Image (tube, coloured by chain):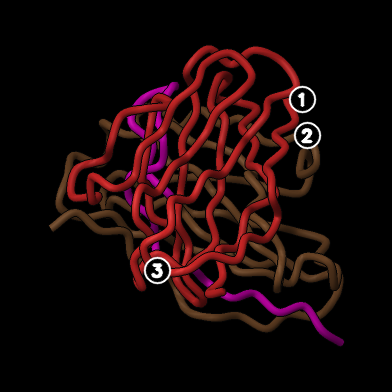
Chain colours: A brown, B red
Amino acid sequence: QVQLVQSGAEVKKPGASVKVSCKASGYTFTSYYMHWVRQAPGQGLEWMGIINPSGGSTSYAQKFQGRVTMTRDTSTSTVYMELSSLRSEDTAVYYCARGPGTKGAFDIWGQGTMVTVSS
Amino acid sequence: DIQMTQSPSTLSASVGDRVTITCRASQSISSWLAWYQQKPGKAPKLLIYKASSLESGVPSRFSGSGSGTEFTLTISSLQPDDFATYYCQQYNSYSKLTFGGGTKVEIK
């Protein structure tokens, strides 16, 4: 079946970086865009950016420009989201989500990865 | 960026009630709007896309309407499984997506 499986929870110190993976299966990896969305504890959803697995092009929300990098590995159908210069406000659940094309709702979501930033 | 404003932020209702949630966009997004349901500790689930199209497998008691800047999600007869938080999302521009603040549907 179509699914996105993310890497496990992370605990990081302020100033460090974290890299979260999202492995796709059950569909043609390069046919759908992948988005990253985060949710701080008790808060709403926040869109971080998008990657086109076909060519690797990316677009990031202005808030994360300079701190986030999204990449993909077509050989393993995996996308990655790396966030640097972590601060306590980055403590959140990070989700990958599939989007069909440049104008499409997110029809498949990963299970989420909890990232805790604490000294 | 396009701002999405949901109302109410919390809604108390009983099983069998008709429930309506509103989402307003700060500028026109045509029909590029989706609705998601999220339960505690779970990823969001797509309910409605393109403002009024029901995602496959979603019960028909869910419906969406609207275009331009004003949209609604309606649950025709609230079921026990529907108590959750609902989010709208605009995807008019794929590089500047935004979500509404969420509406928590609670048991009255």
Segment colored magenta: A97-119
Image position of A55 with respect to B87: above or below: above
Q: Are marks 1 and 3 on the same chain?
A: yes
* Three-letter code for the amino acid on which mark 3 is drawn: Val
Q: Which residue is mark 2?
A: A62
Q: Which of label 2 and label 3 is nearer to you?
A: 3
| Chain hosting mark 2 | A
Q: Quadrant of residue A100?
A: top left
Q: Which residue is mark 1?
A: B1
Q: Determine whether, in the image, residue B72 is placed left or right of residue B80.
A: right
**Under tag 3, what secondary structure?**
loop
**Under tag 2, what secondary structure?**
helix
* Three-letter code for the amino acid on which mark 1 is drawn: Asp
Residue A74 on the magenta segment: no
Q: Are marks 2 and 1 in contact (CB under 8 Å)?
A: yes
Pointer 1 or 3: first along the chain? 1
* Three-letter code for the amino acid on which mark 2 is drawn: Gln
| Residue B48 circle label | none
Query: Could you say where residue B106 lies in the image, as x and y percent from the top left?
Result: 56, 70
What's the residue at 67%, 83% (across, down)?
A: A11
Q: Determine whether, in the image, residue B70 is placed left or right of residue A83.
A: left
Q: Are marks 2 and 1 on the same chain?
A: no
Query: Could you say where residue A42 lies in the image, as x and y percent from the top left?
Result: 70, 71
Residue A99 on the magenta segment: yes
| Chain hosting mark 3 | B
For the N terminus of chain A, the quadrant is bottom left
Q: Which residue is mark 3?
A: B15
Using a 10 Å C-alpha cutoff, classify the residue at mark 2 as few (fewer than 14 neighbours), some (14 to 19) or many (20 or more): few
